[in-house]
Amino acid sequence: MMNLNKPLLIDLPPENWRFDDLPSYRVSQIQQWIFEKGTLQFEEMSNLPANLRERLQEEYDLNPMEIARAQGSADTTQKFLWKLRDNQFIESVLIPATEGTKGVRASRMTLCVSTQVGCALGCKFCASGLDGLKRNLSTGEILGQIILARKKAGRRIDNLVFMGMGEPLANLPALLPALDQILSPNGLGIGARHITLSTSGLVPKILELAKYPAQIRLAISLHGGDDETRRKIMPINDRYPMKELLGACEKFIEMRKKMITLEYILIKGVNDDIKQAKLLAEHANRLNAKVNLIPYNQVEGLEWERPSQEQIMAFKNKVIEGKPPRVTLRMEKGHDIDAACGQLRLREKTIEDKVAL
Ligand code: SAH
Ligand code: SF4
């Protein structure tokens, strides 16, 4: 059993690891073990003197989570359910993608990362928000997902998408220090252009993120072309209606000189009519934004469904007609293993609830 009274070392920035005058070369060695070699056990740090390893062990925890379950196989989508030190569950999804044509094929690894246990925003279609927010993840718990998934994959992770459980912009105090370590060459060394934050539209936080020095990519979960449609499925729209949200996007783009993406889940009979497609194209044009269409992934116990293939194509074609810079249709790779955010945890919880009865 892990001792929760001990602080988690990777919750702290490395410059604060210099307890008791630990020399900076020792800090660098520990950083290398953790971020380069993916070691989350002090006893494995063989170039540290034994008494230092013991002292570290006495004062800190290093491993933020244990694997509770893995689903999928190495060459397809893999999903990890993690058990945190306080027995809460979160999940991360590892998605390989083969890119390139005519023999020059490169395979890239994308990790979908969680930022909270649950979510307070309660979008009606989403498994993550069903039970509300349990708590924010700490910096080390965000980093731990990447370090451990990379170890499981046995190879480098090229892209990060913060599209797992939770609302990343509702946890900026833990996420921004995690991003510092993700970006740092002494940390995980993943470039800002390979990192995407997805938000349901927390307007003030979008503006706060615009001030973060690195050029992280931003994706907005729009899911409706007008307030009436969006508020049916996203309660957050009452707090920050479309006009304010699109205005914040405009400001973000102006400040960053960077394109954003509008994500749009397609839910049968809710937001998949052609009028919404036309509005979506108009918003994308106004913002010079890319559009990513995502056919809804069915969640057990929820009534929402994915539209027919014909409706999906008709919607897509209507958006393309409006000529936004780019339109993609995400083919859900993890469909067969409940890869939409929050679903594996939901299942685990249901099993636990059943066991508890
Ligand atoms: N909270 C953030 C990021 C996590 S959700 C956000 O909402 O943007 C990441 C993306 O997955 C969002 O666009 C979300 O709307 C989408 N999503 C949630 N549940 C889904 C489901 N069942 N099928 C398809 N996409 C889903
Ligand atoms: Fe939270 Fe995003 Fe799910 Fe909405 S879609 S409940 S913001 S995780």
Image: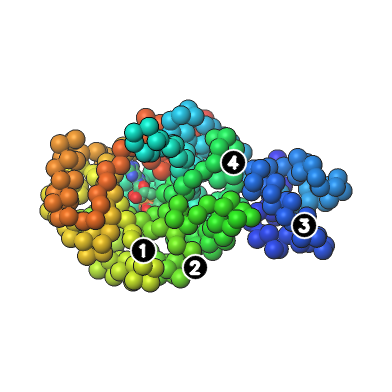
Residue at left offset 34%, top offset 36%? 101
Query: Does 86 sit above or below residue 253?
Result: above
Tell me the number on the disc at residue 33.
Answer: none
Q: What residue type is labelled 3?
A: Tyr
Marks 3/4: CA distance? 24 Å
Q: Which residue is drawn at 38% across and 32% down?
A: 103
Q: How far apart are marks 4 and 1 (CA)?
A: 31 Å
Helix, strand or loop at mark 4: helix
Report whether the residue tagged 2 is closer than 8 Å to ligand 1.
Answer: no
Q: Distance between the residues labelled 3 and 2?
A: 27 Å
State how many labels appear: 4
Q: Which of marks 1 and 3 is nearer the N terminus?
A: 3
Crowd class of label 2 (few under 14; some 14 to 19; many from 20; radius 10 Å): few
Say the numbered circle drawn on residue 258: 1
Which is more N-terminal, label 4 or label 2? 4
Label 2 to label 4: alpha-carbon separation: 27 Å
* Residue occupied by mark 3: 25
Circle 3 packing at 10 Å, graded few (<14), some (14-19), many (20+), is few
Mark linked to residue 213: 2
Residue drawn 44% across and 55% down?
Answer: 193
Of labels 4 and 1, earlier in sequence is: 4
Report the mark closest to the observer, 3 or 4. 3
Under mark 4, the amino acid is: Leu
Circle 3 SS class:
helix
> Residue flagged by tag 1: what amino acid is it?
Lys
Q: Colour scheme in the image?
A: rainbow
Report x, y in % for residue 210.
42, 68
Quadrant hosting residue 196: bottom left
Q: Which of marks 4 and 1 is in front?
A: 1
- Which label's residue is closer to the chain start, 3 or 4? 3
